Image (tube, grey):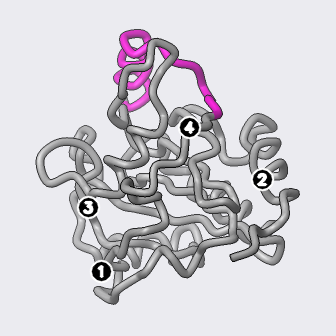
């Protein structure tokens, strides 16, 4: 059911699996790493501590057809963490109500079933009223081919942030974490030097 619904939305949206972006620097607009979130344990998580790293932000859910991607995301994190990759999971119940659990239940599910060790944030809204400001920045930085802002379409959509703190790519839910498409983009960003302050 999850896949069928998403594929239908994909046809409507019409943008590719992965898109890379660059835009003029606007000092008045916050970057994706200029936000503070709440982690799954209720503690403040300042994304600015990740500046200079490559960050993959994924909206996750426990009852979706894509939920097994947790395994691939953990493998990515395990393989490239020392090189500078950080995976951030943001649970959301926005799509098909496929993340109904509490933060405690989500944490237990991720750590016991998929052995997740990458940072998990508190359950949040990524689309619609109450949307995390972070997601407003992410989607505005990744318009489609016609220049239109496209909201997150389903669970397990992925945003890649480069070492320079800018969005380097956006990947649809169907793009597996260990696909060559995503791995190539991650390696490209990891190979870039850490910007000097």
Image location (x, y in percent) of residue 37: 34, 74
Provide the secondary structure element on which disc 2 rests: helix
Q: Nearer the viewer, mark 4 or mark 2?
A: 4
Answer whether residue 9 is magenta in the image. Answer: yes
Instruction: Depth check: give the residue in front, 22 or 109.
Output: 22
Residue identifier under label 4: 23
Q: Which of disc 2 and disc 3 is earlier in sequence?
A: 3
SS for tag 3? loop
Which label sits on residue 104?
A: 1
| N-terminal-most mark, 4 or 1 | 4
Residue 62 appears in the rendering:
no
**Residue at coordinates 48% horizontally, 74% vertically from top-left?**
47
Q: CA distance from mark 4 to mark 2?
A: 17 Å
Q: CA distance from mark 3 to mark 1?
A: 14 Å
| Residue 38 numbered mark, or none | none
Q: Secondary structure at mark 1?
A: helix
Q: CA distance from mark 3 to mark 4?
A: 27 Å
Q: Please give the name of the residue rendered at 28% of the width and 75% of the height, measured from the top-left corner.
A: 103
Residue at label 2? 189
Question: Magenta segment, which residues?
Answer: 2-20
Considering only vertical position in the picture, is 110 above or below 155? Answer: below
Q: Are marks 4 and 2 in contact (CB under 8 Å)?
A: no
- The quadrant holding residue 124 is bottom left
Q: How far apart are labels 1 and 2 at the CA level?
A: 33 Å
Query: Quick one: label 3 or label 4, which is nearer the N terminus?
Result: 4
Q: Residue 165 appears in which quarter of the rendering?
A: bottom right
At label 4, counting other C-alpha atoms closer than 10 Å, the crowd grade (few under 14, some 14-19, many 20 or more) is: few
Q: CA distance from mark 4 to mark 1?
A: 39 Å
Compared across the picture, whether 160 is left or right of 80 comes to: left
């Amino acid at each position: 059911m999850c896949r069928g619904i998403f594929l239908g939305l994909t046809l409507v949206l019409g943008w590719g699996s992965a898109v890379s972006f660059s835009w003029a620097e606007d000092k008045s607009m916050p970057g994706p790493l200029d936000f503070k979130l709440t982690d799954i344990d209720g503690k403040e998580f300042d994304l600015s501590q990740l500046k200079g790293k490559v960050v993959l932000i994924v909206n996750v859910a426990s009852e979706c057809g894509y939920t097994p991607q947790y395994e691939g995301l953990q493998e990515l994190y395990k393989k490239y963490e020392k090189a500078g990759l950080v995976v951030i999971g943001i649970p959301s119940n926005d799509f098909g109500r496929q993340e109904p659990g509490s933060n405690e239940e989500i944490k237990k599910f991720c750590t016991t079933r998929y052995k997740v060790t990458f940072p998990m944030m508190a359950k949040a809204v990524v689309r619609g009223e109450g949307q995390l400001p972070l997601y407003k920045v992410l989607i505005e930085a990744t318009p489609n081919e016609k220049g239109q802002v496209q909201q997150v379409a389903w669970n397990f959509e992925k945003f890649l942030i480069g070492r320079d703190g800018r969005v380097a790519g956006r990947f649809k839910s169907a793009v597996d974490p260990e696909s060559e498409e995503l791995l190539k983009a991650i390696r490209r960003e990891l190979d870039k030097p850490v910007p000097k302050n």
